[in-house]
Image (cartoon, rainbow, N blue to C red):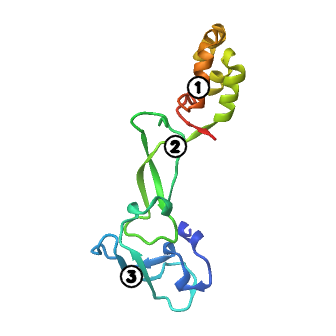
Amino acid sequence: DLPPFLEHCPCRVPCSSLPAVCLQCDYTASCVYGAATNITCRPREYVDCEGPETVQRSFSCRFCYQTSPWEHDCATSKTECRVIHAPLQRQLTNCTVQPHVHCLGRRQFNKMVPCNWTSGKRWSTALALSVTLGGFGADRFYLGSWREGIGKLFSFGGLGVWTLVDVILIASGYVGPADGSLYIF
């Protein structure tokens, strides 16, 4: 059974052009954080490359969990984490450093990230429903707040007052989907 990192390793290319995930490097943890550090690397087992197998690379000394957000990918999923919440809620997720990035330590790590998911509700649809059918509670039903929707339906939108307030609240983004997710804009 072949290791999963091989999917990022091209075959029969110069060893000097291999991404970091395909190389076994002599990292030293005694380097100065953030300083450019030279390392010696060799192709990992099962990697097929051409030319000199010893490769010199330079990288910024840091652990993989210290990489910038654009240098690693984090798996996010719908959780009980509420996006609209004070203080801002966070969720634990698994992150993997991108194949070309050199760093110290494990290439997969856990990280606390802000809640950021959507259930597919559009802000424009919610606002349009609030303006046109808000007196019947259509906006609240669309957002998943069925209790408020029933209240608006049977009170004729609070005799128009509740409807007007909801148009303002939805337009400003104060009222969102009941499950705590973000709108799609």
Mark positioned earlier in the residue sequence (1 or 2) = 2
Q: Residues within 10 Å of mark 1 (few under 14, many from 20)?
A: some
Q: Which residue is mark 1?
A: 168
Kind of residue sitting beneath label 3: Ile
Can residue 165 be seen by looking at this rendering? yes
Label annotation for residue 39: 3
Residue at (55% x, 91% y) in the render: 51
Report the side of 119 relative to 34 (left or right).
Answer: right
Kind of residue sitting beneath label 1: Ile
The secondary structure type at the circle numbered 1 is: helix
Q: Nearer the viewer, mark 1 or mark 2?
A: 1
Residue at (59% x, 69% y) in the render: 7
Mark positioned earlier in the residue sequence (2 or 3) = 3
User: In the image as oriented, which residue stretches furthest toward the left?
Assistant: 30
Q: Which residue is mark 2?
A: 116
Q: Position of residue 13 (x, y in %)?
A: 61, 84
Kind of residue sitting beneath label 2: Asn
Could you give the CA–CA distance between mark 1 and mark 3, rounded to whole angstroms?
58 Å
Q: Residues within 10 Å of mark 3 (few under 14, many from 20)?
A: some
The secondary structure type at the circle numbered 3 is: strand
Q: Nearer the viewer, mark 2 or mark 3?
A: 2
Task: Report the front residue among 185 and 100.
Answer: 185
